[in-house]
Amino acid sequence: MVSKTFELYKKAYTGLSPQTWLLSLIMLINRSGTMVVPFLTLYLTRPQMGYSIDQAGIVMGLFGLGAVIGAHLSGKLTDKIGFYPIQLFTLAFGGFLFFMLSWMNSYASICVTTFLLSFVNEAFRPANATAVAYYSKTENRTRSYALNRLAINLGWAVGNAIGGFVASINYKWLFWIDGTTNILAAIAMFFLLKPENNGKREHKEETINPADSVYKDKEYRWFILLVVLFAACFFQLFTNLPAYFRNDMHYSERFIGLLGTVNGLIIAFIEMVLIFQIEGKRRNTYFITRGVLICGLAYLLLAVFPTSYSLAMIMIVSMTFGEILSMPFMNSFWIERSKNHNRGQYAAMYTMAWATAQTLGPVIGALIAAHAGFISLFWTLGICLLVASIGFYFLNAKMSRTQNLPS
């Protein structure tokens, strides 16, 4: 039994390019310091800072707005100059902006610096997503993104575990650790992974047609709208949900950090093997539909049942499995619809969908929580995700069969 399990894990990780592994290592270094965003709402609403949940929601909304603009610009630049310089610059400069944010105390300066930080930091994503596609093959593309996500979530687990402990001592240290890992990731990329032509693939083999524009892809536009709805609900996991656990349930920062760690560890140990088992057997939208549905049911658990430590853990575990089924296949969906010459634009629109959700989700969620209570928020999130899962179901049924797979 042990040998079979080992063989399964071995196969799941076999066949990926060395560059894919290096990208994931760089991502792991970067994300191991992910501490500011998960704890930013808690940082702003603690007595020493004195800001309300509404004000914290606006800050998180500005983080999302900066991400939308940064992603849009990054997508265009990635197609023009390549993914390598974009990644290198955003990692390094983003690190210094984390340091700057730690020095800001006035609400206006926090808002401005948060916007600039997200503009730079999130501009990294379209370039990085394009890099993963560049170094992967069609048959292992979902696994390549899953490995990248594994690095993100393993780093997330480490960051949350350490961040919960650090936050209980001094919140300011979170910014310095996050900024330092950004800069270390940039250094690693500079020395370990410098592709020819800055990672910009020549497009001589393709006929560049204006009709290939991402803005003329109707099915992709519908997909993006559904992703925005899903992501707006999913982001509550890192913004208003921690505030609920601390302010209403009086859970400690360490327990809240533990929940994030559990999320990251489950993804680290299960996602690659699960993707290896199911990749290519059904359409991407088939798995997305079910993953989004599970996430909706996870929020409804908090709406229906009295919250306890065990229910909080069950909710996070359920949300994690929904995330595993949906997000890797969302990446595969957009990459299948793009071509070499417009991949940055597709990656940018996908990143912008998440950034838009990061702008709207925390603000709307905070307003609902502040004026109607957190239970009303959880009902809203659960119902919205059920609607999104129905939308993905119809998108799956509507799409023409580009592969001979069951819908």
Image (spheres, grey):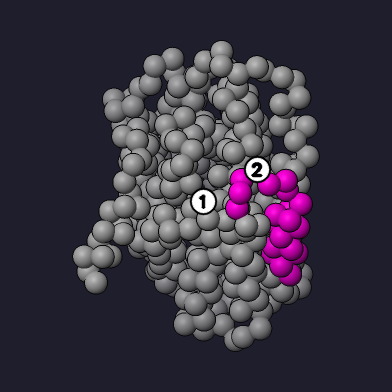
Q: Say left or right for 29 vs 400.
A: left
Q: Which mark is residue 280?
A: 1
Residue 65 in picture, x, y percent from top left: 67, 41
Residues rendered magenta in the picture: 383-405
Residue at 34 percent of width and 35 percent of height: 17
SS category of the residue bearing label 2: loop
Q: Which secondary structure type mostly characterizes the magenta part of the structure?
A: helix
Toward which corner of the image does residue 210 lie, by quadrant? top right
Toward which corner of the image does residue 403 lie, by quadrant? top right
| Mark 2 and mark 1: Cα distance apart in space | 12 Å
Disc 2, disc 1: CB below 8 Å? no
Residue at 76 percent of width and 47 percent of height: 222
Q: Is residue 181 visible?
A: no
Work out which residue is located at the far front of the displayed protein and give it.
404
Please say if 80 is above or below 285: above
Q: Which residue is mark 2?
A: 402
SS category of the residue bearing label 1: loop
Residue 266 in picture, x, y percent from top left: 40, 64
How would you rate the neighbour count of disc 2 (Cα within 10 Å): few for under 14, some for 14-19, many for 20 or more?
few
